[in-house]
Amino acid sequence: MNGARTVLHGALSLAGSLGVLLAMIGVWALLSGSGWVNRAFLPSPAAAFGSLVQGLAGGELAAFTLATLGRMWSAWLLASALGIALGVLIGSSRRARVWLAPTLEFVRPLPASAVMPLAIALFGLSGSMVLAVVAFGAMWPVLLATLHGLAGVHERLREVAHSLELGRAAFVWKIGLPNAMPDILAGMRLAMTVALIVSVVGEMIASQPGLGQAILLAARSFQASELYAGIALLGALGFASNALLALAQQRLLRWQQP
């Protein structure tokens, strides 16, 4: 009975989401077809979809998409590794927290776009510059999630670890990280969104191959259908990446489910 209700609830949610999407496309088509907005700035959904299909099938859009995906995933993996490593170091050591907390509080509020001029001075207008900036921006959700998860270890578990005379490394590996895993995975999902956003911004500023450059070039040449096709593709990539990570999170945390 509960399974049938879950399936029905999922079907209703999916139908509602598709209804909202179709309604938005309908409003878009109405605005474009009525002439209220110049088609040079708002093409029809059919024209944007046609440009999307043509770009993916035979144009440069497929190559730009692969470039953005590669940059986003590489920076996300680097940011996740750095965030978890720094989170474990700071969260498991009182001395490290005392030494590093002021520096982290100074650097953490800086937006990734603000450090881009410094990265350009260090790396030039290169792919390495974009990778470094994206990793910097995406690292913080993972780092803060790791710290939060380690800080949330129950006091009883700490007492058990003390009774078993577990060292710091053993405590982190056997108790701390498993306890922090839900927070870490949630932080990694947020970091993926940040990685996609900063990758696009970096591609626009540094003129690196990718969807950011494709969208910027389409806007400068007043190719509205290509512009909207690129934006729609970015939204689809973000949605698919988040859904993939949500599925992985659900499978990895099956032990938490009743």
Image (spheres, helix red, strand yellow):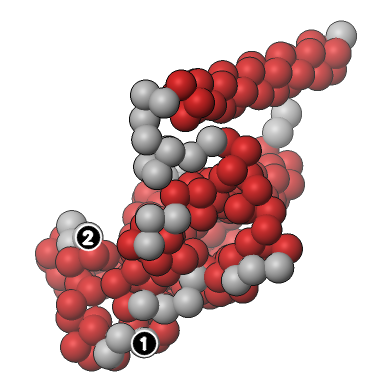
Q: Hey, which quadrant is residue 105 in on the image?
A: bottom left
In-front residue for pair 231/16:
231
For image coordinates 20% across by 72% down, the residue present is: 115
x, y percent for residue 54 = 68, 58
**213 on left or right of 206:** right
The amino acid type found where label 1 is placed reads: Ser
In the image, residue 45 sits, relative to residue 3, either above or below, namely: below
In the image, residue 248 sits, relative to residue 85, either above or below, namely: above
In the image, residue 116 sits, relative to residue 145, either above or below, namely: below
x, y percent for residue 117 = 18, 77
Residue behind mark 2: 111
For image coordinates 51% across by 55% down, the residue present is: 226
Of mark 1 and mark 2, the one earlier in the sequence is 2
Query: In which quadrant of the rendered image does the C terminus lie?
Result: top right
SS of the residue under disc 2: loop
**119 on left or right of 21:** left
In-front residue for pair 46/194:
46
In-front residue for pair 130/250:
130
For image coordinates 47% across by 29% down, the residue present is: 32
SS of the residue under disc 1: loop
Report the disc number at residue 92: none
Residue behind mark 1: 126
